[in-house]
Image (cartoon, rainbow, N blue to C red):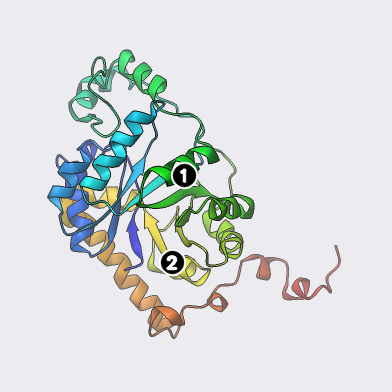
Amino acid sequence: MPVALSPTAHHSLAHPDGEKATAKGAASANTAYVVSSFANHSLEDIAQAAPGGVRWFYLIPQNDPGRTKELLRRVESAGYSGIWLTVDQPRFQFQQRPESNLESAASVMRLPNLTFEDVPGDASSQEFTTYLSDNVRQPITWEDVVWLRKNTQLKIVLKGILTAEDAKEAVRVSVDGICVSNHGGRQLDGVPATIDALPEVVRAVDGKAEVYLDGGVRTGTDVLKALALGARCVFIGRPALWGLACNGAEGVRQVLEVLKDQLNLAMAQTGCTQMSDIKPSLVIHESYYLHGRHCHTGTCNN
């Protein structure tokens, strides 16, 4: 199924089983799940909860290369098949929770894939926030991608690419995949919608890496449009969390099944009997109608 789960944080705030339930839901729908470094359960426990699932790991490199290598070895040993690296967030904003939420947050906000044995205080303390800020590598550079390529045999996907220039550089440093993403539109105001950036990235990659998309996918027709414009797969974030909060692992599976059913219907209604029938001609940008068909033939006046 060409719909999988993006890395999102703190699933234990949505359901007591947290990421373990999310992994089970994804596995039961026969699709992949990208486990976040901000998961509340260890990557090993998540793998054990859904041993048959396809799992990738969203890595946040540490300032200490030895600790990053330790994380990579854990990921490899636990059977994950790829590493995701977010490249559109050069600075993290680690903030304390409002005081009224501290007690409840501290009870679920363990970060066993991001912290080490010397972490001070608990997840609600200023010491913990300072620890994260001091130890997480900021910003990520192309040199970090090259370092990662040299230190793991796993597939590498860069998440957060929106331009042809960055896509070409990603191919140059031998990544295996690119996820066209704007971080849910919550890191930088005014960034383009990922569906608008997708065609440019696909052209720049020219088949040398797989191209994925996340951001704003809510229906089967959204999936169809992204596939038509060149995405190999789309990823969802918030909808999976809604399903998790509503009904645990089964809720995650239900959300994925809804999207699958909607995609099947959209394919049928557009004459596509198989994935290879989904072509770019299925999608026309709204500007085609807003500015008049004649504008696209060079005959309109400015």
Q: Is residue 227 above or below residue 86?
A: below
Residue 232, disc: 2
- Cα separation, mark 2 vs mark 1, equals 19 Å
**Residue located at (60% from left, 55% from top):** 168
Say whether residue 44 is left or right of residue 135: left
Q: N-terminal of the two: label 2 or label 1?
A: 1
The spot of residue 23 in percent (x, y) is: 21, 52
Residue 191 at least partly seen: yes
Q: Secondary structure at mark 1?
A: helix
Say whether residue 214 is left or right of residue 45: right
The spot of residue 98 in percent (x, y) is: 33, 20
Q: Is residue 101 above or below residue 191?
A: above
Q: Amino acid at mark 2?
A: Arg
Residue situated in front as seen by the camera: 191 or 92: 92
Q: Amino acid at mark 1?
A: His
For label 1, the residue is 183
Residue situated in front as seen by the camera: 55 or 142: 142
**Residue located at (22% from left, 50% from top):** 22
Say whether residue 181 is left or right of residue 200: left
Q: Secondary structure at mark 2?
A: loop
Crowd band around label 2 with a 10 angstrom C-alpha radius: few (<14), some (14–19), many (20+): some
CB within 8 Å, label 2 to label 1: no
Say whether residue 157 is left or right of residue 281: left
**Residue located at (35% from left, 34% from top):** 68
Residue situated in front as seen by the camera: 186 or 179: 179
The spot of residue 105 in percent (x, y) is: 24, 26
**Residue located at (50% from left, 54% from top):** 174
